[in-house]
Image (cartoon, rainbow, N blue to C red):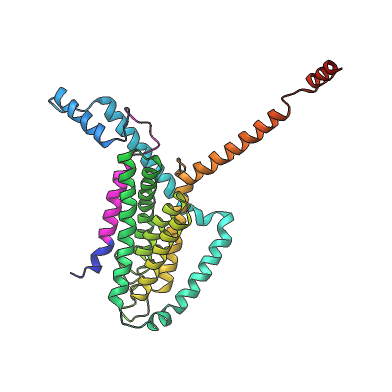
Amino acid sequence: MNPQNVRGPVLILLVSFLCASALSQDPSAPPAMPEAGSVFFQTRFASGQMQNDPAGSASPARQDTSSVKTARALKRFGKDQSDIYSAPFRVRNLKWDALVLAGTAGLIATDRQASRALPTTHLDLSRSLSNAGLVGTTAALGGLWIYGIKTHDEHASETGTLAVESLANTATVYALTQLVFGRERPAEGTGNGRFWIHNGLNSSFPSGHALFTWTMASVAAHQYPRPWVELLAYGTAATVSATRYTGRLHYPSDVVVGSLIGYLIGTHIFHAHRKSRSVQELAEQRARTEAAGNVRSNTTWRWKTSPLEAYRRKLRKR
């Protein structure tokens, strides 16, 4: 079996698994016990519960808490889906819709010529780079998520959670567009990029690699708004998009549309659900607070001697 034929379904299954993990750890729900984020504490607690309760029956309170978390996470996911799919139909976005449609149409019109102008050498290198960019970004955010949970770093764990939520919301868009458009890849069929040919999740439009990488890059760059983080995140995503084209796996319109949708979904999830603030934001707030404190201190010092007291001192000198 050709590995490319199963890459799309495998990617969807992977994202679905990550989504299921996120639903069981909804950060908006209050913790059921102290230090609920600690895996070590939960393990010790579970061990003690198993010793005290040989039958292994779960506490009704814990079952209720788990059900509430799951219901809340599903409601949150449904709200995100509603916002994402309704966004193009909002009046304030119609002008942007027109620009995107016009640009996409222009790219589709030149896709065949652009693809055939590419050299056929170094295709494996481009494809390896695109895979490495996607896997590397996923591994980096996954590692950051685990680190945040282990060390109780709220901002790091929130970054991982937002990335998972973004991937879950992106997965539905990816699956829908793949099934609806069913476009041939540059090396398939007549090489003209015909639409409505495929019936699976491995078609050309839009690029899944670009879609998922830009989603994660957007979350990471917004959570850590530092120049080097933005350069690394967006640079990796741009490399993935470019190499999907140079590897003759996608047309220019595929990677541009995938990149745009991924960035917008990641940005939406960040603004909709961010709670913690980055170290840089906290440092800026601390600096503003200290500056405000100095102003108040200087103002107090200026008025420490009231006009009445100054007049009395003047009388005493006389």
Say if 131 sits above or below 166 in the image.
below
Q: Verify whether residue 267 appears in magenta.
A: no
Q: Quadrant of residue 177?
A: bottom left
> At x 83% / y 18%, what residue is drawn?
317
- Quadrant for the C terminus, please: top right
Q: Where is residue 216 in the image (x, y as percent from the top left)?
A: 39, 55
Front position in the image: 43 or 301? 301
Note whether residue 53 is visible.
no
| Residue 218 in the figure: left or right of residue 10 | right
Main SS, magenta region, reads: helix
Front position in the image: 28 or 47? 47
Residue sticking out furthest to the right = 318
> At x 55% / y 66%, what residue is drawn?
99
Note whether residue 139 is visible.
yes
- Quadrant for the N terminus, please: bottom left
Q: What stretch is highlighted in magenta?
A: 9-33
Q: Where is residue 225 in the image (x, y as percent from the top left)?
A: 48, 52
Q: Quadrant of residue 52?
A: top left
Q: Verify whether residue 31 appears in magenta.
A: yes
